[in-house]
Image (spheres, helix red, strand yellow):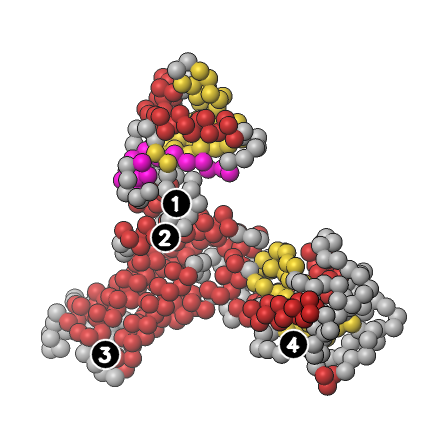
Amino acid sequence: MNRDSPEKGAYGDGSPIAAFATPLAESALAVIRCSGDGAVELAAPFFSRPEKLKTAAGHSIVHGWIRHEGEKIDEVLVSVYRQPKSYTGEEGLDISCHGGIAAARGVMKILRKAGFRNALPGEFTFRAFMNGRIDLTRAESVMEMVSAKTGAGLRGAALRLSGALENEIRSLRDKLTDILAETEIYLDYSEDEFVPGGAEDPGGMAGEEGGGMPGRALAEEVLARLGALAASFKRERLYQDGALAVIAGKPNAGKSSLFNRLIGEDRAIVDEAPGTTRDFIEAWISIEGIPVRLADTAGLRDGLSPDSVENTGMDRSRALMAEADLVLCVTDGTEKYEHEKGFPFKGETPRLFIWNKADLPSCPAPPRGFLPVSAITGSGIPELCGAIAAALEKTAEGPHAPGGPGEMTGAAPGTQRQKELIDEAAAPLAEALDLADRGEPLDIIAPLLRESANALGEITGEVSSAGILEKMFSKFCVGK
């Protein structure tokens, strides 16, 4: 169906919209969200208490029935929101109905008869942005909240939703705007007319700074803060997207037992016979706030096995290890450790070496660099989890927040779009400072400052285009 067809509507067309805000499934309740000018008036004729609904104050709840042609469809509670004090900035309704699929669909069918069209993905948040209720960083954090896999990821998204990143970006853009204003004032005067700190330089920004660039020290501060924001991105995404950790080792090293211990349930088959695991299995877990996709793989042998299925399993294991963010190399501590042979996996992926079966009397002390654990008793597992978290944070190359690992500042980019625009802001600013060092004229430096400020404006949405906005919001859930 064409995006701009009347049946589907288009972003920004202003028509009243409705969508399920909860999954369509058997549950205690279902919530249908409505928004748009005249939303209450549209819904009132299909409500058992139309006048009560029409006169309801904002942020109030009205009880009644959704009905059509005398037939009662469902008993509901309608939360009423009045413009502009609503999520979207428009008049809105949240209809709480019974969670049965038939009941929820029946209410939605009546809303379409009333004149509401189906909302597009992210259209409620799009309207909130267009009506000045939130900026783009807060809009994107809405979906970060929805997709957060751990408490740490949720906290980072919540901080961005509360405005931590927006405030930092606006602060940096304001400083760049001040520098640009001083630069353009300087260009309006000849060198003989301009007096640093005079009436035409009220902030005293021109001064006697190197390269003759007004506000140079401030520009260097902005560039340093942009660099810190960019550096924090990998760590921020680690807590949002998670990482792949692969358990690997020779047959019968206890890989599957360790996998079961870490995920807290018996998912992998454990047997004394080597080669029990023929293919990898995986599960999502949280390790010190980091979402980790943990994979148990087939045992690795030196050379080929006479069993072709086992060889296929080993090939898949090596392929998965090549994709991993971290490989957990498990060794049976009761077996003779031949250091010269090394571990049967070569590659650049970061690795942790684990000395398993440390609880057995026949297990000697581990070699240097190995973590002693027992997958059976749980001994050493807390230390292993700490080592996994530290190794993954190291691969993210981001500075720790003041509170230590797992504590999020929020003033960091949470999406690839934000990170790319921070880089786009930093590049022309660095070039401007370099040109100033070489004594180049301000008329070629000023456009670079403007380019940097515009890139920051795109992050918050102060500078944007309809095409970019539609592409961004189309990735959201329907009902958000």
In the picture, the disc for residue 472 is: 2
Q: Residue furthest top?
A: 70
Mark in front: 3 vs 4 = 4
Q: Residues in magenta?
A: 7-23
Labelled disc at residue 212: 3
The answer to whether any part of residue 332 appears in the image is yes
Depicted 154 relative to depicted 173: above or below: above
**Mark closest to the chain's N terminus, 2 or 1:** 1
Examine the structure image and report whether residue 394 is included in the region drawn in magenta.
no
Q: Who's the residue at 42% across and 67% down the image?
A: 230
Q: Residue at x 83, y 73 (%)?
A: 334
Q: CA distance from mark 3 to mark 4?
A: 57 Å
Image mark for residue 382: none
- Please state, as top left, top right, bottom left or bottom right, where the N terminus lies in the image: top left
Reply yes or no: does residue 19 show up in magenta: yes
- Residue at image mark 1: 122
Query: What kind of residue is marked 3?
Result: Gly
Instruction: Tell me the SS state at disc 1.
Output: loop
> Mark 2 or mark 4: which is in front?
4
- Compared with 164, 449 (above or below) is below
